Image (cartoon, grey):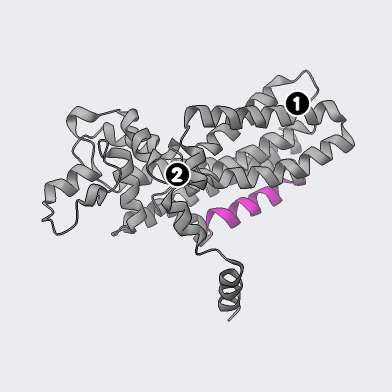
Amino acid sequence: MNSCAKRCKFYGVLFAVMFVAALLVAIYYCNLKTGFHVDELWTFGLSNSFYFPHIFWENNMDANWMDPTFIQSYLTVDTGHVFRFDSVLYNLSNDAHPPLYFFIIHTVCSLFPNEFSKWFGLVPNLCFYSLSLVFLFKLSYKVFQSKPVALILMALWAFCPIALNLVTYIRMYLLLVTLALAFLDALFDMFNASFANRSVYFRLFVISLLGFLTHFYFYIYLFFVSCFFTIYFWARKGWRFSFKYGVTIVLSVCLSFIIFPPALSNMFGNHYVESASSQSGVMVLLRRIWQFLG
């Protein structure tokens, strides 16, 4: 075995050891999880409650006795309502998020009707965490052409408190991070793609579509990424390359609105967004920056 093959095998073993170690650490913290943020309970409720998006829907909590079975029914999938994605779409049309992550949670919970467990949300997050490690390693290696550097960057993310918090937080943000990394990985491949290479465009289309259906933040992320790379492609590879990239992204945006039409009203018109925007003024932002510096 030559030296190159030995190095490849060494780094392959090192990657596997680090990957398994990171996964074990994440599982350890998942096992320690004992409570839920209210948004995590909304994750289960919006995913599993049958055409009943919020527990306070229709003034249900106003001076009414809440039977424990009502709470259980809100958080779990009833036996007769398994794999009812139409209900998930309805619930999310009355919320402020796209439906993809909630589809995933509903799918897992439908396999265990009338049961509730933190692992129904943690196991998907562990899968997204694993994928984020793979995409980060791939992207880092492509950028720096160095496996040691790629492993270091992977380790910095793998054992970062933020990453581990995202694993144990049963919301869509870890899926969002994973898709953002996957998009950059595909975009980097586009640098060396010929005009005839349609597989890269297809990857960009699918990943961006999944991102749009995961969180509205992905629109903001992709807007700035696309602005930069469209200018780059225009300057370095010509307008045809830039045009094809732009059409790919626009088509994915259009399809995301076709799949989930309430996205427009959810982003700009419902009371959840209005409440959030009222807390995001310039002075509020400056005050929070000052508090952070303190």
Q: Which amino acid type is marked by label 1?
A: Lys
Residue 93 location (% of width, % of height): 40, 38
Q: Determine which quarter of the picture holds residue 203.
A: top right
- The secondary structure type at the circle numbered 1 is helix
Q: CA distance from mark 1 to mark 2?
A: 29 Å
- The residue that mark 1 highlights is 244
For the point 11% across and 51% down, which residue is it?
A: 67
The residue lying toward the viewer, choosing from 165 and 29, is 165
- Please say whether residue 173 is visible from this viewpoint: yes
**Element class at badge 2:** loop
- The residue that label 2 is drawn on is 97
Total count of labels: 2
Q: Which residues are magenta?
A: 144-159
Q: Could you tell which of marks 1 and 2 lies nearer the N-terminus? A: 2
Magenta-drawn stretch contains 154: yes
Mark on residue 264?
A: none
Horizontal side of 233 relative to 213 (left or right) equals right
How far across and down, in percent of the image, does residue 28 sit?
A: 38, 55
